[in-house]
Every structure is written in structure tokens, then in C-alpha cells.
Amino acid sequence: MRRRCPNCKSVNVRRSSREPDNPNEPRFRSPYRCRDCQTKFWAISSRVYKLIALIAGINVVLLGAVMYFVSLIPDTPRWDSIRRNGSMLERPGTATAELDGIWRKV
């Protein structure tokens, strides 16, 4: 990524030194100085871009893992849909038919 001077729009810039122990300096920005007009300016540090890429990569991996484990959950019908459908209740010898017979007696 090429840095550009905000004053003269030149790309002839270099990293500048930080002032020691200055609490007012921006934390996630790096100082640069234009070699043409000698203007000092701040730009977003390359570490911030790397950190954003790392966080995005971790989120993609976690999302993929969640989607994978969700796909492993078997598709079992809920009891409400079985009762509405009635297809499993009429089969003799099934556990649902026996349970349905017990529940109808109560």
C-alpha cells in the first residue's frame, strides 16, 4: 500500500520517528513524513490491517466449524409433526403407536 502525502499528494514519503513518551499520539497509526514538502502526517498502521485480516480469518474458520457441526445433527421429526401427519401412528408394533394407545386410554 502506497502512502500519499495529504498536503502535496506526493508518494515520496518515509516512516517518521515517534516522539518518546507522548500519550497523545494515536495508538493504531504510524507517523510518516513527506520528503517533498516535509509535512508530518499519520496513516493507519500495517499492523492494523494484519490484525483485521487475522480476525476475519478466525471468524471464517469458526463459522465453517459451526456450519459443519450443525450439518451433523440428524433430521429427526418433532412429535407435533408426527401427530399431525399420522403416518407413524397407524403402524402396529411401533413405539409411537403403543405410546399413542396408552395416551388415548388416559
Image (tube, grey):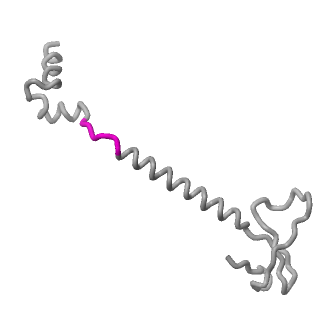
The secondary structure making up most of the magenta span is loop
Q: Residue furthest right?
A: 20
Q: Residue at x 15, y 21 (%)?
A: 100
Q: Is the residue 21 above or below the residue 81 in the image?
A: below
Q: Based on the displayed image, in which of its 4 quarters is residue 44 positioned? A: bottom right
Q: Based on the displayed image, in which of its 4 quarters is residue 58 positioned? A: bottom right
Query: Looking at the rendering, in which quadrant would you find the N terminus?
Result: bottom right
Q: Residue furthest top?
A: 106
Nearer-the-camera pick, 26 or 30? 30
Left or right: residue 6 versus residue 1 is right
User: What x and y, as percent, mark residue 103?
Assistant: 17, 17
- Does the magenta segment cover residue 82? no
Q: Is the residue 31 above or below the residue 26 in the image?
A: below
Left or right: residue 2 versus residue 36 is left
Q: Is the residue 60 above or below the residue 89 in the image?
A: below
Q: Please provide the residue range marked out in magenta.
A: 72-77
User: What x and y, as percent, mark residue 96?
Assistant: 17, 25
User: What x and y, as percent, mark residue 16?
Assistant: 85, 73
Nearer-the-camera pick, 34 or 54? 54
Q: How many marks?
A: 0
Query: Looking at the rendering, in which quadrant would you find the C terminus?
Result: top left
Left or right: residue 79 versus residue 72 is left
Q: Residue at x 13, y 32 (%)?
A: 88
Q: Residue at x 70, y 63 (%)?
A: 47
Q: Residue at x 26, y 34 (%)?
A: 78
